[in-house]
Amino acid sequence: MDKGLIGGSTVLMLLSLLQERDYYGYEMIKEIERRSNSIFQFKEGTLYPVLHRMEVQGFLKSYKKKAESGKERKYYHITAKGTTQFAKEKRQWGEFTGSVQKVLGGAGYACT
């Protein structure tokens, strides 16, 4: 998958997950991979800088919590600003994908 296409949707995918519940980083990597049938396979070195930037922007807050295994993990929680950003990104994604579909030949276009 083209990294440019993935890069443009990373924040949207992360915010979407965090709308459901709090996640720790590696858990997000695995959940996105599972939901995308392994199309999206983020590396930790790619994901953590994005999460850090989103935290600086005020979209997320992180906190540490011990897992059942006793290992302390850094969890991420979406903020009110992040929820607003998610709605904005989701709307923009819908407009973008709808426009691409129109260019490609309308709603009946099937990817092969």
Image (tube, rainbow, N blue to C red):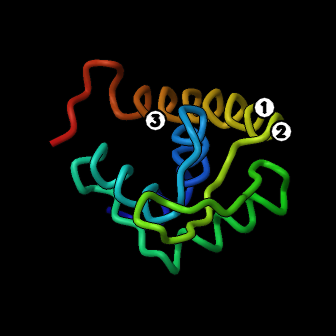
Q: Is residue 54 above or below residue 95?
A: below
The outermost residue toward the top is 107
Query: Which amino acid, by three-letter code, is at mark 1?
Result: Thr
Mark 3 is surrounded, within 10 Å at the Cα level, by few (under 14), some (14 to 19) or many (20 or more) other residues, namely: few
SS type, badge 1? helix
Return the residue at label 2.
Answer: 81
The quarter of the picture where residue 110 lies is top left
C-alpha distance separating marks 1 and 3: 25 Å
Query: Which amino acid, by three-letter code, is at mark 3?
Result: Val
Of the numbered discs in the image, which one, if any, rests on residue 75? none
Residue 65's spot in the image, x, y percent? 62, 60
C-alpha distance separating marks 2 and 3: 28 Å
Return the residue at label 3.
Answer: 100
Quarter of the rendering occupied by the N terminus: bottom left
Mark 1 is surrounded, within 10 Å at the Cα level, by few (under 14), some (14 to 19) or many (20 or more) other residues, namely: few
Q: Residue at x 56, y 70 (%)?
A: 72
Which of pointers 2 and 3 lies earlier in the amino acid sequence?
2
Query: Which amino acid, by three-letter code, is at mark 2?
Result: Lys
Residue 35's spot in the image, x, y percent? 30, 43
Please state which of residues 51 and 103 is positioned toward the viewer in this rendering: 51
Q: Residue at x 46, y 35 (%)?
A: 100
* Tally of numbered tags: 3
- Confirm or deny contact between disc 1 and disc 2 (CB under 8 A): yes
Return the residue at label 1.
Answer: 84
Quarter of the rendering occupied by the C terminus: top left
Which of pointers 1 and 3 lies earlier in the amino acid sequence?
1
C-alpha distance separating marks 1 and 2: 5 Å
